[in-house]
Image (tube, rainbow, N blue to C red):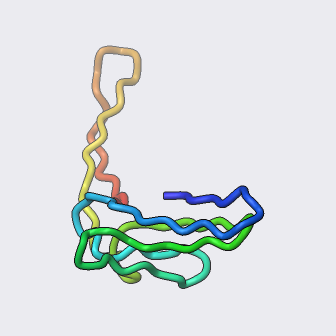
Amino acid sequence: MSIDDLWYKNAKLRLRVGAERDEMLVEVFDGRHSHRHSDGQHPITLEPYAWRWYRVGAPDNVLDRSDLAVGRHDGTNRTRPRQIVNFRV
């Protein structure tokens, strides 16, 4: 998720993410992680012209992956063998 403050004053936000494992928003570049409060919202303050990139989950959720089966059609009405592709959620 990307958040931008395009104004010359601080921006104070309260975000309700509503996703699985949203108790923590991990700031991708800076380490300013946000922890969900008891009301279910993440309080975030942005300085003037600041930006943050967040992802949902713990800082080390590399193990939270699933497999995606991908079939490709080669134009001859035959399907190539399925490939298993790992992706992060």
Asked whether 76 or 57 is in front, the reply is 57
In the rendering, at what x and y percent does residue 36 appear?
A: 32, 76
Horizontal placement of 42 versus 38: left or right?
right
Residue at 66% of width from left, 60% of height from top? 5
Determine which quarter of the picture holds residue 71: top left
**Residue at the (37%, 83%) spot, across then down:** 60
The residue at the far right in this view is: 8
* Residue 76 occupies quadrant: top left
Tell which of 59 and 1 is nearer to you. Answer: 1
- Quadrant for the C terminus in the image: bottom left
Between 77 and 63, the residue placed more toward the observer is 63
Q: Residue at x 35, y 25 (%)?
A: 73
Q: Position of residue 65 (x, y in %)?
A: 28, 65
Residue 7 sits above or below residue 70 on the image: below
Vertical order, 87 against 69 (above or below): below
Asked whether, in this view, residue 38 is left or right of residue 7, the answer is left
